[in-house]
Image (cartoon, rainbow, N blue to C red):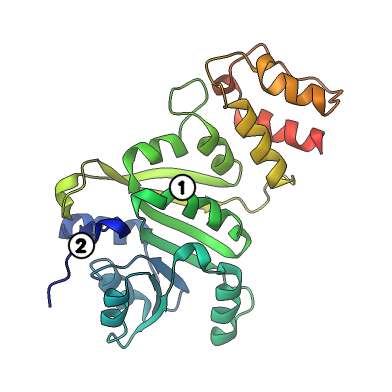
Amino acid sequence: MKHIPRKRFGQHFLSDQGIIDGIVQAIAPLPGQPMVEIGPGLAALTQPLVERLGRLTVIELDRDLALRLRLHGQLDVIESDVLKVDFTVLAQTLRDKAGQPDLRLRVVGNLPYNISTPILFHLLDHVQVIEDQHFMLQKEVIDRMVASPATGDYGRLSVMLQWRYAMENVLFVPPESFDPPPRVDSAVVRMVPYAEPAPLSVPLLEELVQVAFSQRRKLLRHTLGRWLEARQFAGEFDTQRRAEEVPVAEYVALAQNCS
């Protein structure tokens, strides 16, 4: 039976074989690796992945698609909203099955554009059990993720993710690669967690960055400067700049010195 894409799930199914091959090549799956695919849909990417891995865990919210995926003998299907999945517990379960306590998850997926940012932040909470992530996203979101300081795309998402991951835009995906075609360009990003990230309070960094970019056209003395004063910050930080002019390393250092 043909599956009709559901708007409420943001479903756009990948159908371009050349793009699928390019994504699989970028992921480079190896037999036995513990991999989790978010939103497998009609299994366009799922099938070539599982052929290389041997077994694959998939997370699918759509009940009809989950039912269809369960018929595949090499898939472990989690029927759930990905935002409710505890990836730390999932990693432990897969480690126990494999008998390898040091295994970390590889996470892949064509993320629904309407909740892609919440998914990225949800995974950030479980980054310690993740080896790498390869996601297809709206191109403008990836542009923001990998943006450099002093550019229009550089913002809260850039800082919060670049602090924890090395990221690379690895593949452009045009709308006609999907059925139905979305109204935006897409791309694939590679995200590799840093082995030794700077120690800091993530909620504090998040609050600090949110305040800094709350009025990005104004100098930081109007926003972050007042926030620092309220916390009686005694260190040095140049607030005669706009938020987009401050490199990630400076935000990280400030979060460390504020805690």
Q: What is the quadrant of residue 169 in the picture?
A: top left
> Which of the two labelled residues, at mark 2 and mark 1, occupies the earlier sequence position?
2
Query: Vertically, is 56 above or below 178?
Result: below
Which image quadrant: the N terminus? bottom left
- Residue 78 position in % (x across, y down): 43, 77
Residue mark closest to the camera, 2 vs 1: 2
Pointer 1 local density, CA inside 10 Å: few below 14, some 14–19, many at least 20 = some
What residue is at 38 percent from the left and 54 percent from the top? Answer: 135
What residue is at 74 percent from the left and 46 percent from the top? Answer: 201
Q: Which residue is mark 1?
A: 117
Q: What is the quadrant of residue 127 in the picture?
A: bottom right
- Residue 164 position in % (x across, y down): 60, 46
Pointer 2 local density, CA inside 10 Å: few below 14, some 14–19, many at least 20 = some
Q: Amino acid at mark 2?
A: Pro
- Residue 120 position in % (x across, y down): 49, 52
* CA distance for labels 2 and 1: 21 Å
Q: Which residue is mark 2?
A: 5
